[in-house]
Image (cartoon, grey):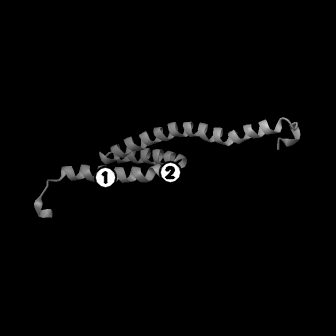
Amino acid sequence: TARPSLADSERPVALLGFLFVPSVLFWSSAYSKEGLVVGFLGILTYSAMQFGEGKRGIGLIGIAAGGVGVGILKPYILFPFVIAAMTWYEVRRARRRPFHLSAF
């Protein structure tokens, strides 16, 4: 698209510059996304803890907000988060129950 507006001597330099445009746009956008994802992940984690402590209403609202935020920007983070949250919940629940060898 820029070829007609450039002189023949300017084209190699312009092409070199155009090569870096997608990379600069991608990596500079990544810095913005990281900050947003960490913020949404904080909301998601705090809300999951609230849900686990019995505050179901506020927990579900925060889980929905944080989960949608993370899911839009970096959905692959949700899979390990769900595994970690389920593990935390089960360990926490197991600590409340008395341990009996008869269960084995």
* C-alpha gap between disc 2 and disc 1: 20 Å
Question: Which residue is at 11% across, 63% downward?
Answer: 102
Toward the viewer: 70 or 30? 30
Residue 38 location in percent, x, y? 46, 39
What is the crowding at mark 1: few (fewer than 14 residues within 10 Å), some, or many (at least 20)? few
Question: Which residue is at 35% across, 48% downward?
Answer: 56
What is the crowding at mark 2: few (fewer than 14 residues within 10 Å), some, or many (at least 20)? few
Amino acid type indicated by mark 1? Thr
Residue 5 location in percent, x, y? 87, 38
Amino acid type indicated by mark 2? Pro
Q: With 75 as the anchor, is 12 left or right in this view? A: right
Residue carrying label 1: 87
Residue carrying label 2: 75
Helix, strand or loop under label 2: helix
- Whether pointer 2 and pointer 1 mark residues with C-beta atoms closer than 8 Å, the reply is no
Name the disc covering residue 97, or none: none
